[in-house]
Image: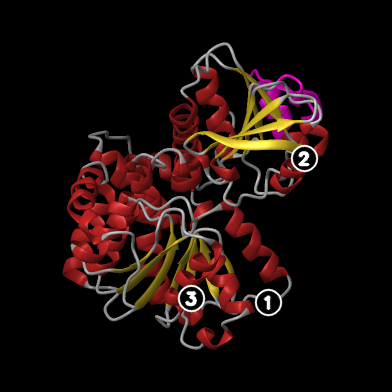
Amino acid sequence: MDHHVKDLALAAAGKARIEWADKDMPVLASIRKRFEAEKPLAGVRISACLHVTTETANLMRTLQAGGAECVLCASNPLSTQDDAAAALVSEYGIRTYAIKGEDTETYYAHIDAAIDHKPQITMDDGADVVGRIHAERTEALEGILGGTEETTTGVIRLAAMAEDEALKYPIIAVNEANTKHLFDNRYGTGQSTIDGIVRATNRLIAGRTVVVSGYGWCGRGIAMRADGLGGNVIICEVDPLKALEAVMDGYRVMPAVEAAAQADIWVTVTGDINVIDSPAFDVLKDGAIICNSGHFNVEINIPHLREKAKSSREVRPLVEEFVLADGRTIYLLADGRLVNLACAEGHPASVMDMSFANQALCAEFMVANCADMEPGVYEVPTEIDEEIAALKLASMGIEIDELTEEQVHYLSSWQEGTV
């Protein structure tokens, strides 16, 4: 089959929303205009495993404008926007395999469909395509030039593969670009995570204790937004430097089991497993809400929670109530999956504008330079990062200073000192 989406009748609504997002993605639009003229990806087969949203649709349009032959599948079973998926197929002719709520078997069948495209470039959001190619579909390695990776979790997995000398082609860690993690992770995850919690629960943040596990760029953003809405923020960390930074930013910091007893809302964003586990379940307050904004639904030990509960039921869409033996209730959002995409719409378009500009330009860079790149994980070239920042500022009508020749000379010399 050349696509698998929920309902092609949703395409018109999806196209309208894709165009709405495009209005707030001027950097990507400028790259798309150049790509249409230059065709730097002419004939290149790209298989992308990303969250299938309106913003992603505009990335796929940009790659297609550059001459690429694109296939898209979902990187999370609950993050697909079905109308956007339908529009990609019907309105833009991009083979798409994604249905919101798809089961695990369907999820991997969709990934296999993307691999069947025989990609020369892979685009991942969590390294599921790369992992499957290396573990089960090794025949697909032939012909792959390189890839890109969008998430912290995916970069961690790829670094482990590279360390074990298992990674067979070069991949650019788009997640590590300053124009990605400083903005997408902090402002995008911060706003969209709180948005997902509020949409799912309709609970007030002000006056409630919000626990955030993980104080990377995503955790910083969530803490900042929760604090701005009047939440009392607690940070849980394992990294002493990040924990110290959280203290200096004005938040309380404590071990998870201590925070659990105070949490009204608890968000994990670490990229690790069983961050909320049995000791926390034993002391969580009655009515506590727990959720995850990390890539995989392993940060909360859901199987153990199900074992401990004497009953469970869905009380609102994507809100599951667990009743424990002592009568306490715990509410789990979105089955522990990305709450910002499952319960809301993911990052705002203006933030994804920069992240997806990185994807497009890194794909162009990979095609042009892959012959000189050994298998491994690479940083986004500085010139790409700076170009995207400059384009974003220009789109906002903001100008900045430039160094004079005298200042450039001074910064590159050593002869002048204290005068």
Identified by mark 3, the residue type is: Asp
Q: CA distance from mark 1 to mark 2?
A: 31 Å
Q: Is residue 410 visible?
A: no
Q: Position of residue 12 (x, y in %)?
A: 17, 53
Q: Is residue 284 left or right of residue 128?
A: right
Q: Which residue is mark 2?
A: 277
The numbered disc on residue 383 is: none
Q: Which residue occupies the foreground of this view, 235 or 372?
A: 235
Left or right: 308 as drawn, with respect to 415: right
Q: Is residue 364 visible?
A: yes
Q: Residue at x 18, y 47 (%)?
A: 16
In space, the residues marked 3 and 2 are separated at their CA atoms by 33 Å
Labels 1 & 2 near each other (Cβ < 8 A) = no
Asked if residue 181 is positioned above or below residue 100 in the image, the reply reads above
Give the camera-side residue of 278 and 125.
278
Q: Earlier in the sequence, mark 3 or mark 1?
A: 3
Q: What's the distance in space between the residues labelled 3 and 1, CA to CA?
A: 20 Å
x, y percent for residue 42: 26, 78
Q: Nearer the viewer, residue 259 or 247?
A: 259
Q: Which residue is mark 1?
A: 166
Residues rendered magenta in the picture: 242-262
Mark 3 lies on residue: 112
In this view, the residue in front, 73 or 335, is 335
Q: Nearer the viewer, mark 3 or mark 1?
A: 3
Q: Amino acid at mark 2?
A: Asp
- The residue shown at (26%, 62%) is 88
Above-or-below relation of 360 to 242: below
